[in-house]
Image: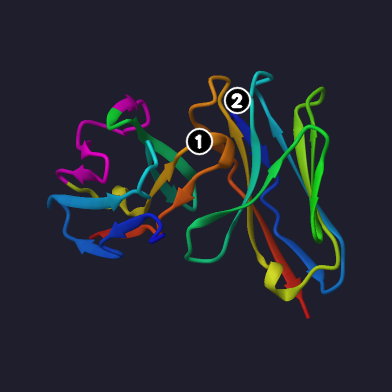
Amino acid sequence: RKEVEQDPGPFNVPEGATVAFNCTYSNSASQSFFWYRQDCRKEPKLLMSVYSSGNEDGRFTAQLNRASQYISLLIRDSKLSDSATYLCVVTSNTGNQFYFGTGTSLTVIP
Amino acid sequence: DAGVIQSPRHEVTEMGQEVTLRCKPISGHNSLFWYRQTMMRGLELLIYFNNNVPIDDSGMPEDRFSAKMPNASFSTLKIQPSEPRDSAVYFCASSLDLIRGYTFGSGTRLTVV
């Protein structure tokens, strides 16, 4: 079983829409969680960490459900510039390496 | 901060040739990671170093791949001999504290023909 599973999409949404991505992880002892964003032909970049209590950064909200072992990312009021691949990341139980999901592709349509 | 610097950005080589990819991590970061990304398999961890010491190389596909980190500011990933199935984007990333996440370099796009 993969450490991290994501729906690859693609998600095609109109500008202004709200879109949510989910990701499940297999190791209940995982310590830290992140969402990364990767633009076409670019490197992944940290979008936000995911905290147990949930956290928000502008239009982006991340949540963690340890009981069900999933994390989510909610994007409100989608912009054209949000078009990218969103990667879910989970650390190992020792916390010394990351496991990346395969990414969810988002295209925001004018 | 110059970020993680990788070279070359692009490499096209013939099957059987040796390929060397280079990485300069962010100054002060004590962990360095080499990843490979393909459409089919996504991001795969090849090897990582902590304080210049290889910690886990279980992701290195086979003996044709080797990595070194002779000092805190430089690492290489070598493929010898290269094969067409090695074609991918190879990313280097560094981290000071994994709680804060990784910083990736811009990658090397390798094509083996």
Q: Chain of mark 2?
A: A
**Who's the residue at 87% across and 67% down the image?**
A17
Residue B68 lies within the magenta run: yes
- Dot 1, crowdedness within 10 Å: few (<14), some or many (≥20)? few
Amino acid type, residue under disc 1 in the picture: Asp
Report whether residue B41 is seen: no
Disc 1, SS = loop
> Along the line of sight, which residue is nearer the eye, B70 or A102?
B70
Query: Which mark is in front, 2 or 1?
Result: 1
Q: Which residue is mark 2?
A: A1
Estimate the x, y position of residue A104 in percent, counting from the top left: 67, 52
Would you place residue A70 above or below residue A58 in this image?
A: above
Is residue B76 visible to us here? yes
Asked if marks 2 and 1 touch (Cβ < 8 Å), the reply is no
Q: Of helix, strand and loop, which one carries label 2?
A: loop
B98 displayed left or right of A14: left
Q: Which image quarter: residue B59?
A: top left
A35 or A14: nearer the viewer: A35
Location of residue A42 in the rendering, given as x and y in whole percent from the top left corner: 48, 63
Q: Quadrant of the N terminus of chain A?
A: top right
Q: Position of residue B111 (x, y in %)?
A: 28, 60
> What amino acid type should be assigned to the residue bearing mark 2?
Arg
- Identity of the residue drawn at 21% across and 39% down: B71
Return the residue nearer the eye: A51 or A2: A51
Q: Residue at x 57, y 41 (%)?
A: B100
The quadrant holding residue A45 is: bottom right
* Magenta stretch bounds: B54-81
Chain of the residue under the numbered disc 1 shown in the image: B
Discs 2, 1: same chain = no
CA gap between label 2 and label 1 equals 27 Å
Judging by the rendered image, the residue that carries numbered circle 1 is: B97
